[in-house]
Amino acid sequence: MVDLTLPIEKLKNVGAKNLPRLNKLGIKTVRDLLWHFPAKYDDYSRIVAIGDLEPDQRANIQGEVVKINVRRIFPRRLTIIDAIIQDDSGGIKAVWFNQPYIANALPEGTRVSLAGTVKLDKHGLYLSSPTYEKIHGDENYYSYNLTHTQGLVPVYPETEGITSKYLRFLIKPLLEEVAVPDPLPEDVRNRNGFLELRDALHKVHYPSILEESDRAKERLAFDDLLLFQIKALLERRKINQLKSLPVRFDKELITDFIAKLPFELTKDQKVAAWEILKDLEKSYPMNRLLEGDVGSGKTVVALIAAVQAAQAGYQTVFMAPTEVLAHQHFQTIQNLARHTGIQVGLLTAGTARSTTGETKKTDLKKQIASGRVKIVIGTHALIQKGVSFDELALVVIDEQHRFGVRQRAALVKDASKPSVPHLLSMTATPIPRTLALTIYGDLDISLIKEKPKNRQKIITKIVPPSGRQESHQFIRSQVKEGRQVFVICPRIELADPDKEVRSAGPQRKLNVLWADMKAVQEEYKKLSELVFPDLKVAMLHGKMKPKEKTQIMDRFKEGFIDILVSTSVVEVGVDVPNATIMMIENADRFGLAQLHQFRGRIGRGEHQSTCLLFTSTAEKSINQRLKALTDTDDGFILAEKDMAIRGPGEFFGSQQSGLPDLAMAALANVELIKKARAEARTMLKQDPNLVQYPLIKQQLLRFQSLVHFE
Ligand code: ADP
Ligand code: MG
């Protein structure tokens, strides 16, 4: 019996040439090989009598080679093999190019099985380069166990030099020889109607009907989903054993603070704030994700928690992904908290500012260390490096889903203090529920679905090439009335995407920034020189220095710039109420959820806002997809749609989630996810250390080493 952990170089059919190619597909062990699932199946389940063949039919035929010969066409160095295959009903020609060895492999008299598409030319029907395999032994063709030409034939993800035929040739015999212990106990399998692992593997590679492969995939996806759930529960258990500063929920104080806000909180904001304040009372760390569309008012909810912590004598740190956003948070928080007398500080690579009047970094750091400044706002990079707190109770992070316990603990440098601050992470990415349950199973989630009442509906329009001029005129008229415009353009495709992928790490990041800059520069040139030479156009891209970016953003906010051209990656969530137009170039190249995010940057003020989706095509199907945006402004509906259209893998990126493809695909299957949650709970309840499930435990370790969270 072959062991699943056996390295593939030990297999006799894997040579020195193919080993690196297989590695490139991520295949290193027999397990990897067997878990390299077909992308689809070619349906050759019907054996067709040659006399019944029709043009364009995809078919399996079985017969005898009655004639075969090789022709060489010298000037073009072409070798052509012509063969005639015959069964009881008739004969057909088969043609192959540049594979002279086939003549030796299939001498006249050989019984052969062919699979391919039937073609028609002036001489009649023929098969062009069909897949072939010899039939050995018995007269009765039907009893043969064919690999490449009969039944549902697996088609695998391939790479240069590694064909599906070769993979079938490796995988099929292994399925018989390998020992596949099942990590799922029988009662779990029975309860859920799952196939045994060995059976599932057989059926995912060689199903006899498609339904079989569906059942097999469900079982295999379940294994991954279960691991995700177990991992989340273990993570949660670990966190619940850690110590945090409990912050008493002072209802009077909070009611008063809310009453003094310049606007009324939405119901969802109130509920979220309440959930957070309840969590803060606990002596183990909160682990909560605050999800709300752009502009839904997450900052003030986090601020409520920070105010409560401050009144209890503790500190809060807000970490923003960029300097621009850190500045913006500082302004908002400073305004909203002014009457409370709580001291607020801003610390970024470029600046130090504080309500205490401090403008020197070193002095501000001292005030943070002494506990005088209670709310500290900064960028991730800076805060994590050189800041000591007095008593840090709460960490708020913006636009990043995860912030590990270890990273949090590192912020508390005094070993005598409770070790891990509470965490509130905020995101404007509406995450479909199944995805959240799976990937963020260790987080509690608060949702803000409702928008503040004063928001205007944004008009969204799809602009085909013929409508450009009119839109440009509209933009000009809006600018004349004093409004401002965001322009987003997608990255120009990198010259060699393959190279981009291979060069991971800093080089890749550089390439990406480079491509971004080029896209922005071209658009900037076009708009500033040709389309709007009379208006003030500026650009923003990832290769600029943080200070430059902040300056441009500030000038835009202050109204000195009419039109700001930027890439998709810069400054999610900036708040410029006077910007009322969002123009997106090549909108069809973005996902719905992302387009919705861009749109969320406008519609924040009193004026009517418009989002213009420029497309380079008038093609119906593409514009149909974009139409979803004109139909709804609910980010959650759009996210679900986006996931349905593009598939969960594209929507979220398998890389980012760490979920294998099958499990990704299974995210559409709510029932399966519920089952995985339930089984994970039961297992851990009965057996907290998974002693009875050594195989699952082993997989968990393997899996943890594979998954890298943000
Ligand atoms: P996001 O959820 O995108 O981070 P912000 O917290 O930046 O949104 O809020 C966007 C704007 O809406 C801010 O100017 C904020 O002061 C304002 N705001 C927040 N809540 C409300 C509300 N309930 N009513 C009116 N305006 C609000
Ligand atoms: Mg925000």
Image (cartoon, helix red, strand yellow):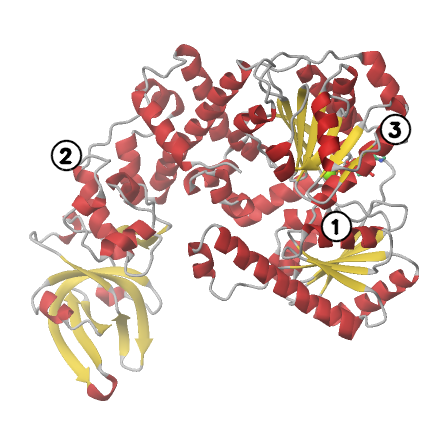
Q: How many marks?
A: 3
The circle on residue 338 is: 3
Asked whether the viewer can see residue 235, the reply is yes
Q: Is residue 642 left or right of residue 531?
A: left
For marks 2 and 3 on the same chain, the one whose residue lies earlier in the sequence: 2
Q: Is residue 156 left or right of residue 533?
A: left
Residue 401: % across, % down? 60, 35
Characterize the local packing of mark 3: few (<14), some (14-19) or many (20 or more) Cα atoms within 10 angstroms.
Answer: few
Residue 560, image quadrant: bottom right
Residue 555: % across, % down? 82, 54
Residue 436, image quadrant: top right
> Which amino acid lies under the numbered mark 1 shown in the image of this protein?
Thr
> Which amino acid lies under the numbered mark 3 shown in the image of this protein?
Arg
- Compared with 697, 570 (above or below) is below
> Which amino acid lies under the numbered mark 2 shown in the image of this protein?
Met
Characterize the local packing of mark 1: few (<14), some (14-19) or many (20 or more) Cα atoms within 10 angstroms.
Answer: some
Residue beneath label 2, please? 1
The circle on residue 550 is: 1
Q: Nearer the viewer, residue 659 or 669?
A: 659
- Compared with 16, 346 (above or below) is above
For marks 3 and 1 on the same chain, the one whose residue lies earlier in the sequence: 3
**Tag in front: 1 or 2:** 1
Q: Quadrant of ligand 1?
A: top right
